[in-house]
Amino acid sequence: MTLEELEDNEDKFNEEDERAIEMYRIPLCALINQHFSGIARKFSDVKFIKAISTTCIPNYPDRNLPTIFVYLEGDIKAQFIGPLVFSGMNLTIDELEWKLSESEAIKTDLDENPKKPIEDTLLSSVQCSIPTRRDSDFEDD
């Protein structure tokens, strides 16, 4: 969908409609495209729009892809820009659903964030190497 087509079709959307627009162009976006389609089927009350990045926004840099913009009542609610935001190729459909629900684009039935927090191994190794204080170590001889 081009920017012109998006503007032409804008009248077809109600002001209150929630919209999620995904911009794609490069192969890295294929996984998110697949997840986006699955989520769009699950949440049919939300308008999901796909657009080729440079067709929608001229000269949009590939380094910012994939990109998802979330709009509500004509205002941007959230922006997800670049591969690091999406955890690269390890992103699951549930993780993307959770991300979209945090921006209030959708109301998920997931109870918690499916992405497990990454343990800070440096911090945990430092904490494990700190000796525990024993009262006998500090008694006078």
Image (tube, rainbow, N blue to C red):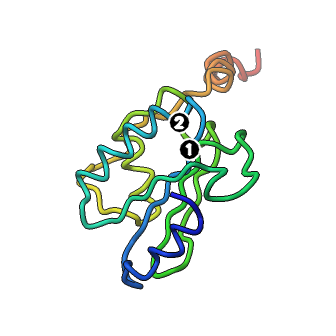
Q: Indicate the position of residue 65 as horizontal and vertical percent values.
A: 63, 42
Instruction: Check disc 2: other Cα within 10 Å, few if <14, some if 14-19, many if 20+.
Output: some
Q: Residue at x 34, y 41 (%)?
A: 94
Q: In this view, does 140 lie to the left or right of 45?
A: right
- Asked whether the beta carbons under mark 1 and mark 2 sit within 8 Å of each other, the answer is yes
Q: In this view, does 36 lie to the left or right of 26?
A: left
Image spot of residue 80 (x, y percent): 58, 52
Mark 1 vs mark 2: which is more N-terminal? 1
Residue at 54% x, 60% y is: 69
* Residue at position x 61%, y 58% in the image: 56
Q: What element carries label 1?
A: strand
Give the residue type at disc 2. Cys
Secondary structure of the residue carrying tag 2 is helix
> Residue beneath label 1, please?
24
Task: Relative to 21, say whether 116 is above or below.
Answer: above
For label 1, count other residues whose C-alpha is less than 10 Å away and answer few (under 14), some (14-19) or many (20+). Answer: many
Q: In which quarter of the image is residue 102?
A: bottom left
Instruction: Return the residue nearer the eye: 69 or 98.
Output: 69
Q: Nearer the viewer, residue 67 or 87?
A: 67
Determine the CA span between mark 1 and mark 2: 6 Å
Q: Name the side, left or right, on which 99 lies relative to 64.
A: left
Q: In this view, does 11 lie to the left or right of 61?
A: left
Residue 104 locus on image (x, y percent)? 41, 66
Q: In which quarter of the image is residue 114?
A: top left
Give, as a three-letter code, the residue at label 1.
Tyr
**Residue placed under numbered mark 2 in the picture:** 29
Residue 12 horizontal/vertical position (percent): 37, 78
Relative vertical location of residue 126 with respect to residue 43 in this rendering, above or below: above
